[in-house]
Image (cartoon, rainbow, N blue to C red):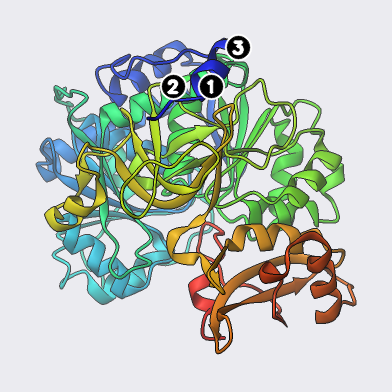
């Protein structure tokens, strides 16, 4: 079966069917080329400081030498990085990769339990950590087998003495990142022979079903995904001309691949936002940047469009606003377009797929409600519960094969046995539908689907309809047990500032837009919805509310 309806759409719009996943022997080769080509141009900005590509080149080389000579880091060693979007992040990352090591990306807001699991599971003996996160590490460092702690302050890499939180005194013998850079500047780096098969990142997945697992991503996975993104959006990756503001966290695969690796490889000027919750400071950064590209999750866009000063930002240069991580709501895209002139161009992916599997290409001129076409060199099948491919227009589990798909989870043979189909397609756990042009719509997570009287209800659809109701800022939908229908739809709503809104009004709005079994049976108003650190709404946390 699998007629691949997207191939005809590729041909109509001049998109290549495939990319060269070995365009560079490794990500390090790709970054080295950019650092030489754009040496004098600004690479990263934060806190009023700027690093040129030459600065990043010099300092990451010093850090790689220091890791090799002082710590004895060898090819394949895992090094944990627990940093927000600071200028030290790209320096540390490129240094780790140049030393041939594997970066283990860690959320700086993790609890001690989560951190301990990830450090032990990955076998990391070295961690590069923001000063402000050191109290968490101090709780578990010894148990987790950490031998070397490298602490990072906001000004590290720039020479600027910016205010910094203290390092937890329990972490005796920790080394300041700035000191490691100074020491490494006088050491010799040993070049490491890297190929596409070598690991680059252990990217831990959310752990919604227990302990998180490390997606083992290779250099080829990331080179492929960079090339796929560039092939899909050639007009938004103009060499040496792009300006991107990065507020989504670099430790998350979305920002890591798109904002950092892709845009660094084309010489972009990247403005880092360490704390997007400081919306006033975030909007000031947007004002100064004259951005051409922006990437975000729906909740980030939703917060920005409600900010009183967002209309003071000059969006005249913006030509790509991308969305992913969770479903982009049409009402959010409409508000964003009204303010900026650009709709939100949605894509879809997972940690296990480096991450992008599909994206709305340059030919799409308005919000589509789909996640776009599969990336070049990517095959996607939609399978039913029996593993049989569904007919076009029917929904099924999204299963993907391509050069960006991981080979498996780190040290998880049992999980790997069930993560792939017998013919090698990765099973995403998401339910999708293809239209006749090959555009993929994600209807929901398999496990989030609500079954009302035998009918499938997808929370994404209910939320998209309810968000368009005047007075609704954001909402989340879950299934709850019901004596009559098996499950019923329950909706949690956060009101827009100043809105007066009743549950009956929300239900009446939904009734006008959806068939009866999809309409929420109950509506509960909350001050805020529970969210992950990257802004995904955590429906599972609402089930007992």
Say which of 317 and 544 sits in front: 544
Residue 187 at x, y percent in the picture: 18, 30
Where on the picture, by quarter, is residue 196?
A: top left
Which mark is drawn over residue 12? 3
According to the image, label 2 marks what residue?
A: 376
Residue at point 50%, 62% (across, down): 533
Indicate which disc, 2 or 1, sits on the residue closer to the N terminus.
1
Which mark is drawn over residue 110? none
- Whether residue 236 is situated above or below residue 257 in the rendered picture: above
Image quarter where the N terminus lies is top left
State the SS at label 1.
Answer: helix
According to the image, label 1 marks what residue?
A: 232
Residue 103 at x, y percent in the picture: 27, 44
- Whether residue 294 is situated above or below residue 473 in the rendered picture: above
- Which dot, 2 or 1, sits closer to the camera? 2
Image quarter where the C terminus lies is bottom right
Where on the picture, by quarter, is residue 455?
A: bottom right
């Amino acid at each position: 079966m699998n007629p691949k309806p997207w191939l005809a759409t590729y041909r109509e719009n001049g998109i290549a069917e495939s990319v060269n996943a070995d365009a560079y022997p490794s990500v390090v080769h790709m970054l080295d080329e950019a650092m030489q080509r754009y040496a004098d141009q600004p690479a990263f900005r934060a806190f009023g400081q700027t690093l040129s590509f030459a600065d990043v080149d010099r300092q990451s080389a010093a850090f790689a030498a220091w890791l090799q000579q002082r710590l004895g880091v060898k090819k394949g060693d895992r090094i944990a990085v627990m940093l927000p979007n600071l200028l030290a992040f790209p320096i540390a990352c490129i240094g780790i990769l140049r030393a041939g090591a594997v970066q283990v990306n860690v959320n700086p807001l993790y609890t001690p339990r989560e951190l301990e699991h990830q450090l032990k599971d990955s076998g990391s003996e070295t961690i590069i950590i923001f000063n402000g996160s050191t109290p968490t590490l101090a709780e578990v460092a010894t148990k987790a087998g950490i031998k070397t702690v490298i602490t990072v302050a906001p000004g590290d890499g720039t020479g600027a003495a910016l205010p910094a939180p203290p390092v937890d005194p329990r972490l005796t013998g920790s080394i300041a990142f700035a000191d490691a850079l100074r020491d490494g500047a006088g050491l010799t780096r040993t070049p490491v022979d890297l190929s596409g098969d070598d690991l680059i990142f252990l990217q831990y997945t959310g752990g919604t079903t227990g302990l998180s697992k490390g997606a083992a991503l290779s250099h080829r996975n990331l080179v492929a995904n960079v090339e796929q993104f560039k092939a899909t959006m050639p007009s938004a990756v103009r060499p040496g001309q792009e300006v991107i503001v990065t507020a989504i966290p670099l430790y998350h695969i979305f920002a890591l691949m798109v904002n950092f690796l892709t845009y660094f490889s084309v010489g972009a000027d990247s403005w880092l936002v360490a704390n997007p919750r400081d919306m006033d400071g975030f909007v000031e950064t947007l004002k100064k940047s004259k951005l051409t590209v922006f990437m975000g999750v729906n909740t980030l866009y939703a917060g920005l469009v409600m900010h009183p000063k967002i209309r003071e930002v000059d969006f005249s240069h913006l030509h790509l606003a991308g969305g992913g991580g969770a479903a982009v709501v049409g009402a959010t895209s409409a508000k964003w377009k009204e303010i900026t002139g650009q709709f939100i161009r949605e894509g879809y992916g997972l940690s296990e797929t480096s991450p992008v599997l599909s994206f709305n290409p340059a030919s799409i001129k308005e919000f589509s409600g789909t996640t776009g076409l599969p990336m070049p060199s990517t095959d996607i099948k939609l399978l039913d519960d029996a593993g049989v491919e569904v007919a076009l227009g029917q929904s099924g589990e999204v299963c993907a094969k391509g050069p960006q798909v991981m080979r498996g989870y780190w040290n998880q043979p049992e999980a790997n046995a069930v993560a792939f189909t017998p013919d090698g397609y990765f099973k995403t756990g998401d339910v999708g539908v293809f239209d006749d042009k090959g555009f993929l719509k994600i209807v929901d997570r398999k496990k989030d689907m609500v079954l009302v009287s035998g009918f499938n209800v997808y929370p994404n659809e209910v939320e998209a309809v309810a968000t368009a109701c005047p007075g609704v800022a954001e909402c989340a939908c879950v299934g709850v047990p019901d004596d009559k229908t098996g499950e019923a739809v329950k909706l949690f709503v956060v009101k827009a500032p100043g809105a007066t809104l009743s549950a009956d009004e929300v239900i009446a709005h939904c009734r006008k837009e959806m068939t009866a079994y999809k309409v929420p049976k109950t509506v509960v108003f909350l001050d805020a919805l529970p969210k992950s650190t990257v802004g995904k709404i955590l429906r599972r946390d609402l089930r007992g509310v």
